[in-house]
Image: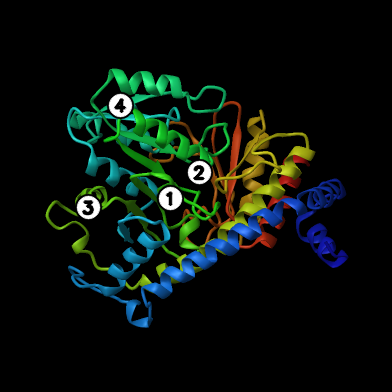
Amino acid sequence: MIDLTKQQLKKNYNISDNVLEIYEKALKDVEIEFKRYDDIREFNQLKVLSALQQERISDSHFTNSTGYGYGDIGREALDRVYAKVFNTESALVRPHFVNGTHALGAALFGNLRPKDTMLSVVGEPYDTLHSIIGISEEENIGSLKEYGVKYKQVDLKNGKVDLDKVEEILKEDRSIKLVHIQRSTGYGWRNALLVSEIKEIISFVKNIKSDVICFVDNCYGEFIDTIEPTDVGADLMAGSLIKNIGGGIAPTGGYIVGKEEYVTQSAYRLTIPGIGGECGSTFGVMRLFFQGLFLAPHIAMEAVKGAILCSRMLELAGFEVLPKYTDKRSDIIQAIKFNDKDKLINFCKGIQSGSPVDSFVQCEPWDMPGYEDQVIMAAGAFVQGSSIELSADAPIREPYIAYLQGGLTYDHAKIGILIALNKTLN
């Protein structure tokens, strides 16, 4: 860091010499790790470019359909591009998905029927899925449980999927229709599942029950490896366009990819049976969706580099972190265990104050819809709630773990982390 930048950080944000020393030590430590992700970024950029070229994308695909949206060539071409990128039979990419949870919910409701059982093999899924499944205390909201879909889960064993227990449940319960695999950490304390680990889980499950749907929540995981879960046997997968794959440009939306029959059933729940993905105007966002996808391999790696630096800086500052800065990563999330409510809140407030948007806002814990605990969210983003932009959030519960993610540029991520650490320590 040049002296002029240091002077500005001290002047504008009162960054202490101690925090700057931690930063400079961490910066040297993480340099060797970045090469691994530069290679992955280059590969994925080629993959996306090739898919766009094969579909002969032109500005005629940047459509602005209205009403029913029949015959929207941009929407149809983007579906085909996503199917190529993810190596699947079909894709459904729509601005009508309000978030990743909505896309996940459409996939679940579309493919599960009364008396079917959903099995989560990674323990309790992300908080916002609890209401969908029916494992929250809410009633009369139309959960899967209320429609007669049963739910079982296998808790992690030493941070890994308990395959012995998975085998036991699959053999004893023939009603299991869908196995849910959450790639990212969510609000847990574990490393994200590597695609190689997801491959092992899918292969194991299919050997026991070949007709089960292996469904992957891919939120935060796109383009962090050279392969995706659909390359290793996932039947169905969903994610959000305001995370990795939207490249920080997509203003909303989500995607579902996989085998055609399962994507079709999902589309019937996004719209209605009999119409599915054939309908739906695109509100003039198609150029942003195409361009965001093109930028996504680069943007995702900017976020990963920020997460690696954060991991090392917070570790040097005395906090427990996961993943470690040397761990192989499978999502953009960095977890920091503060064991202190005030330090957790101050860290998130620091990220907010380092944001380009709403930097003047003091984020506070609140009762956010879909979450069982109060949640604090630092999200000064150009796209509301966009977690590919630098953000941090946490449920207000022990042991007070913050989850940092995103960063459209590595330089901004560095500055935001410096401000957050400074606010935490001083």
Q: Tell me if label 2 and label 3 are in contact, CB under 8 Å.
A: no
Residue reaching furthest left? Answer: 274
**Horizontal arrangement in the rendering, residue 185 relative to residue 368 (left or right):** right
Q: Tell me if label 2 and label 4 are in contact, CB under 8 Å.
A: no
As shown in the figure, which amino acid type bears the numbered disc 3?
Thr
**Mark 2 vs 1, N-terminal side:** 2
Vertical placement of residue 196 versus 381, above or below: above
According to the picture, the residue beneath numbered tag 2 turns out to be: 195
> Gap in Å between the C-alphas at discs 2 and 3?
25 Å
Residue 231: image tag: 1
**Horizontal arrangement in the rendering, residue 266 relative to residue 47 (left or right):** left
According to the picture, the residue beneath numbered tag 3 turns out to be: 264
> Gap in Å between the C-alphas at discs 1 and 3?
20 Å
Give SS at disc 2: helix
> Gap in Å between the C-alphas at discs 1 and 4?
27 Å
Q: Quadrant of residue 209?
A: top left
> Gap in Å between the C-alphas at discs 2 and 1?
9 Å
Give SS at disc 4: strand
**Mark 4 vs 3, N-terminal side:** 4
Vertical placement of residue 221 versus 63, above or below: above
Q: How is the image coloured?
A: rainbow
Q: Tell me if label 2 and label 1 are in contact, CB under 8 Å.
A: yes
As shown in the figure, which amino acid type bears the numbered disc 1?
Asp
Residue at 38% x, 62% y: name it: 84
Residue 151: image tag: 4
> Gap in Å between the C-alphas at discs 4 and 3?
23 Å
